[in-house]
Image (cartoon, grey):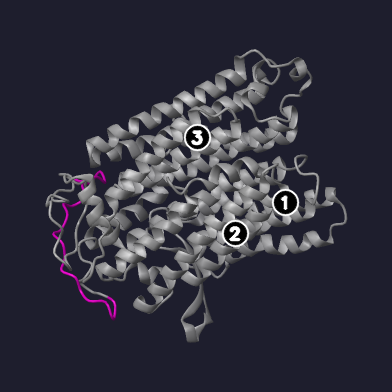
Amino acid sequence: MSSSYPALTVLTFWPLLAALLLALCPKDVHVRAVSLVASLIECALAIPLLRFQGGESGFQFLEKIDWVPAWGLSYTMGVDGISIFMVWLSVFTLPVCVLCSWTYIGQRVKEFHVCLLLMTMACVGVFSALDLVLFYFFWEALLIPMYLLIAVWGGDEKRYASIKFFIYTLAGSTLLLVAIVALRIQGGTFSIPELMKTDFGFTFQYWVFLAFFIAFAIKVPMFPFHTWLPAAHVQAPSAGSVILAAVLLKMGTYGFLRFSLPMTPAASAHFAPLMIAISIASILYGGLVALGQSDIKKLIAYSSVAHMGFVTLGIFVFSVQGAQGALFQMLNHGIITGALFCMIGAVYERSHSREIAKNQGLGKFLPCFMFFFGLFGFASFGFPGTNGFVGEFLVLAAAFKFKTVVGILCVPGALLAAAYILKLTLRMAWAEPSSADGKGWKDLKKKEWVYLALPAALVIYLGLSPSGFLSYVTPTLESAIADFDSRKGGAGKAAAPGVAAAPAAPAAPPLSAAGGMETGLSGALRERSPLPRGETPAFDSFPSESAAAFADRLTRPITE
């Protein structure tokens, strides 16, 4: 579906125009007011996207203008079931960030809000761009404002955290650029929809997948590329942590769905055991480390590593059910964790500490605050009736259907989430207060009611009625998984110019009506000897060979 009204362009570049208008504001109070109005206008500009047709699997709201025809560049925008909710999440995160920073930020207020607006522009652009160069432009545009949010308005160790964030992200972006150039040379276009349907040789897919993997794994972040995240979260101001958790982390998992699976299907199947193993490691590691934290913000930061592990697991079990759970969990994590970081900022303004021991017994003084904190906390570990339960349940069901051992290994991660959230919530609500200072604290302020009420409503609504969300995303995911299933074994059937064709691997069993595999993905990794050169493997389950032999074969150079 296309429209004469450029909804996505207006939605993308209105924050840039609003950032320019802030230059005319002489006082901080005017800056905050204009930023809030601009954020509400941004939400209003997203209303046309409600015409998105949930029953269709293709791209909608298409806009295409020749950009640099000589180089094959075009300004192409569009959304489908995978990206539409990420766009809405990016848009509605902006007013929340403005409100939670109203009294939190006291210096360089104008520059701070400019950074928020520029980040919103880049986030909407990332999820809407259908040209690789345009996508990369927005991907890189996020780096500078996020770096400044940490480096200028961060905590005591902001210099270390901001530099670490910058180096990690820049390293991933460099490899992403290499992959984009390679796709242009072999595929002959920068168009994302065209490249999604192009069949490349297995060797080419192998190396492009690795470049994608490192770029997206850093952004998610997956274990062991996660070390920048806790430092960035702890040192960033509340609004920076909200954007980081709600939107930026989703760019990595969005990349796996948008690029890795459709553009490198055979390589994605080849590396599936590794991706599943890393996802499980992220789930268990994030939960274990979160359980031992005494800093509230650091605990929630490590919980993000575990939650995003469920997302990548849902993607790489290659079923509609798993993809539904992954996409639902992406949205849920943005809502829940974003709200939790807002609340951590609110309690820090009162106690001037993020230590659990300094924020005990708040149920006696701040009952409304603890109600919302308990709601978001329970949703975080997947309590039935909340949105967190639906996404996690779909991923776990898909994992058990894929391979029983995979599901079993994920169960401790779910139990760990309940353990660290309940420990945190019980101490903050009922433990003996560390001092009597809390008696003078005010419960939720008006602006805090405003930015907590909407996420709370979504937690309940999506938890009790997830069918609306699923009806939007399922057609796109069914089409994507069916296309992946038909192409993952045929990397050499229509190789790009200059890439030798590789023999096709045996076809995998068809998808069942429920979205899972009818008989399991059989035949994978049964031979203990290395595959002949040029043969395209179809890896769909864990290897029966030794770990050392599997690692040796996985890292051995593959040639056509």
Residue that numbered label 2 is attached to: 142
Q: Residue at x 59, y 60 (%)?
A: 122
- Residue 336 in percent (x, y) is at 54, 37
Left or right of 308 in this view: 480: left
Q: Amino acid at mark 1?
A: Val
Left or right of 23 in this view: 268: left
When asked about the image quadrant of residue 329, the answer is top left
- Check residue 461 in the rendering and tell me which mark sits there, or answer none: 3
- Residue 342 in percent (x, y) is at 64, 37
> Per the image, is 508 magenta?
yes
Q: Nearer the viewer, residue 421 or 172?
A: 172
Q: Is residue 315 above or below residue 370?
A: below
Task: Give the extent of the magenta segment.
Answer: 496-517
Residues packed near mark 2 inside 10 Å, few (<14), some (14 to 19) or many (20 plus): many
Q: Amino acid at mark 2?
A: Leu
- Residue 364 in percent (x, y) is at 68, 15
**Extreme-top residue of the structure:** 432
Q: Residue at x 73, y 52 (%)?
A: 112
The secondary element bearing badge 1 is classed as helix
Query: Given this view, does label 1 or label 2 mark the residue nearer the observer?
Result: 1
